[in-house]
Image (cartoon, rainbow, N blue to C red):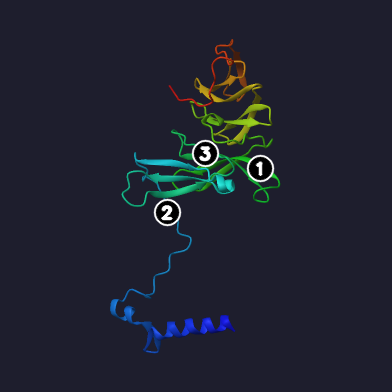
Amino acid sequence: MIKKYISLVVLVLVVSGCQQSGGELTTDKSEKSGTIGEAQPFEEIGRSETLEGAFGHSWLFAHDMNFNTLGRAKIMVLDGAAENSKYRGAIDADQFATFQQPSKRNHLLVAETFYSNDSWGKRTNELTIYNHDMLKVEDEVLLTDNNRAQSATENGSFQLTHDEKFVLIYTFTPATGVAFVDLGSRKLVNQTDIPSCTLIHPRGQRGFASLCEDGSMVAFDLSKTRQITEKHQNKQFNDIGKKAMFMKFVKS
């Protein structure tokens, strides 16, 4: 009875604030100003915008890890110089994803992980290739061993070779390794173990190096046929017991 009484009072108050005009209920304010209660045009459904030619020097990509809901993270496109709305678009980047923007290709690359039941179930690791201008998925490359390393984002866990022919993805099972994806064929073409070593540091046109737990470094070269042609292991150059080795790095 109380709920019915409250509903009746609300209805009376709403009706009392309106007047009859031409067979329709309109508020006094809408009649005077023509704004309140005025019908708005429907937004077109299915419309897609393009960012082709719109990227400027002030535009940037911001990685929203979304730690509260890792399965709904994203890479946002922002215009840092915009006076009002800085947001320009976004792409998905789930479960501790990593991101790269090639300089020689019109693509955006995301290494990410999905589960069949949202946060649990069958795991799928993949490289997702987005169109740079449309921010739409163009292709995906499955990592068949589902071994992509999942951790707080590290630059060294997802890199391009300097010639941008290969994508290098850090793997962890917990044995450490690197998976190679050929961007030309868009296929997983090779993998290698880097035992006791960690992360990926591009070197040369088509190679990479990793820092190891004993203070040494291991380096690999890749051939045009997608095979590892050379492996170099140098002597210890850093005494880990006396001088810490950090995982962060910068390009020189």
Find numbered disc 3 in the image and state the secondary structure of the residue it sits on: strand
The disc placed on residue 124 is 1
Find numbered disc 2 in the image and state the secondary structure of the residue it sits on: loop
At a point 63% along the width and 45% down the height, the residue shown is 114
Amino acid carrying mark 3 in the image = Leu
- Name the N-terminal-most of marks 1 and 3: 3
Image side of residue 103 versus residue 153, left or right:
left
The disc placed on residue 49 is 2
Residue 60, position as x, y percentages in the image: 40, 40
Residue 228, position as x, y percentages in the image: 62, 21
At a point 68% along the width and 30% down the height, the residue shown is 174
Q: Quadrant of the C terminus?
A: top left
Callouts 2 and 3 close, C-beta under 8 Å: no
Image side of residue 84 versus residue 63, left or right:
left
Residue 163, position as x, y percentages in the image: 48, 26
Question: Closer to the camera: disc 1 or disc 2?
Answer: 1
Callouts 1 and 2 close, C-beta under 8 Å: no
Amino acid carrying mark 2 in the image = Glu
Of residues 127 and 8, the one drawn nearer to the viewer in this rendering: 8
Image side of residue 31 versus residue 87, left or right:
left
In the rendered image, the vertical position of residue 42 relative to residue 194, given as above or below? below
Callout 2 crowding tier (Cα within 10 Å): few <14, some 14–19, many ≥20: few
How far is disc 2 from disc 3 in space, using C-alphas? Answer: 20 Å
Q: Quadrant of the N terminus?
A: bottom right
Q: What residue is disc 3 on?
A: 109
